[in-house]
Image (spheres, rainbow, N blue to C red):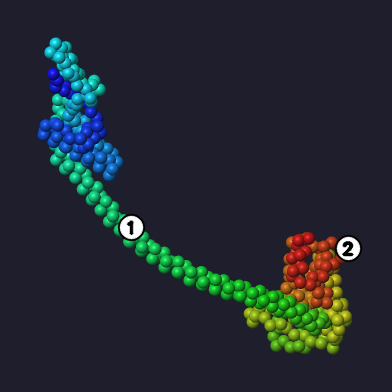
Amino acid sequence: MRTNIVRTHTHVSSSTFLRSSLGTRSRSSPAARRRRVRCYVTHKYWLCLIAVHKRKRWRFKYKVIQLYFYNTMPNLTRSPLNKSYSMSDSDVDKLAKKDTEITHVPKRESKRRRMEHETEADPLDIRKIIREELCGVLSALQQQNSRMDVMEQHISVIKLQNDTTIEKNLDIEKSIQFIHDKVDDLHVAINGLEKNRKEVAAQISKIEDKCDALERFTRKTSVQIRNVPKQKDETKESLSLIITKLAASLSVNLQAAELRDVYRMPSKPDLSYSTVIVEFSTTILKNKFLAATKTYNASARKLKTEQLNSTHFGLTGPQSKIYVSEHLTAQSSRRYFLAREFCQTMEYDFCWTANGLIYLRKKQGEPHILVRTEAQLQSLKKI
């Protein structure tokens, strides 16, 4: 006599349940099959969720669905493989005892018990949630695609502008290179002009020196007397007369025939005095006249008497001091003025002129220095 097969109640995992549901036909009731199909669909959506998104919010949904999956899984029972029991009538008591022991196998302690407030979730709600989430993802993807389109348009515009800028830069580089070449040509031309200028300046300086030498040669017999009072109806004869009177005051024997020319320099009409130029017949007479004036003024300073003034001309009226010196050229006059300033600054004791030339001497007994140019004075300051 054979007995019925007894199935042991055991807990089956989700993967085992799916394999059993899909791989073999179950002899369970229609309600259990519907439950298995529902759980399989739920598990299928759960797998889709993991494949599509792994964001934090999706993980939360995944936990909810997983919780539902494990809470709603039925307690399956299946008979042991290749095990059956056949007993005789004399072993009925033992069979009953075994049936009692086998049919009351407790569940595993590790299986989570269903809470009272947990209810079976509706698959339609889960599908709705999934559909809403998928719609949100699709809308986000559409917005992202639209943004990408806008970015592509901007990038194309920027690329076009970049190409235009590159072309302009190439044109600018060509223009700059052209200007650079022109500037190089100008530098070459300027250097040539500068060289020519220096050559011309050197030639002009030589010509000026020659002109100054010629002018100095024409004035080698002339002296100038500054601050001479003006007279009414003045003529060359009257000027010659006062010059001869001045020579007599200096103890110089001078005749009117020894004067080659006497004339007054132009001046402002409102001034009552001006400069008179006296040209002697010989250079010896000119040097003698200058030496006499220097000697007279030196003795007057030593004796503290009056130096040369307008009374020595035999003129009446206000007394005014007069100054006698060589008739220098314009270039020599400027050098003489700078030389006197140089003597005051650099503590030189002597500065004088002779035959239209300027001389310097620092101390008594030292050699004299002939001042030929203004640059020479600058070089002497550095010594």
SS at circle 1: helix
Q: Residue 335, position in %: x, y?
A: 75, 72
- Height in image: 18 above or below 229? above
Number of the label disc, if any, that sits on residue 365: 2
Residue appearing at x 19%, y 25% in the figure: 79
Give 191 or 306, whichever is nearer the viewer. Answer: 191
Q: Distance between the residues labelled 1 and 2?
A: 97 Å
Mark 2 Cα-neighbour bin, 10 Å: few <14, some 14–19, many ≥20: few
- Height in image: 26 above or below 332? above
Amino acid residing under circle 1: Met
- Height in image: 88 above or below 14? above
| Residue located beneath label 1 in the image | 151
Q: Residue 81, position in %: x, y?
A: 23, 25
Q: Looking at the image, which residue sits at the far left? A: 30
Quarter residue 16 falls in: top left
In front: mark 1 or mark 2?
1
Give 93 or 20, whichever is nearer the viewer. Answer: 93
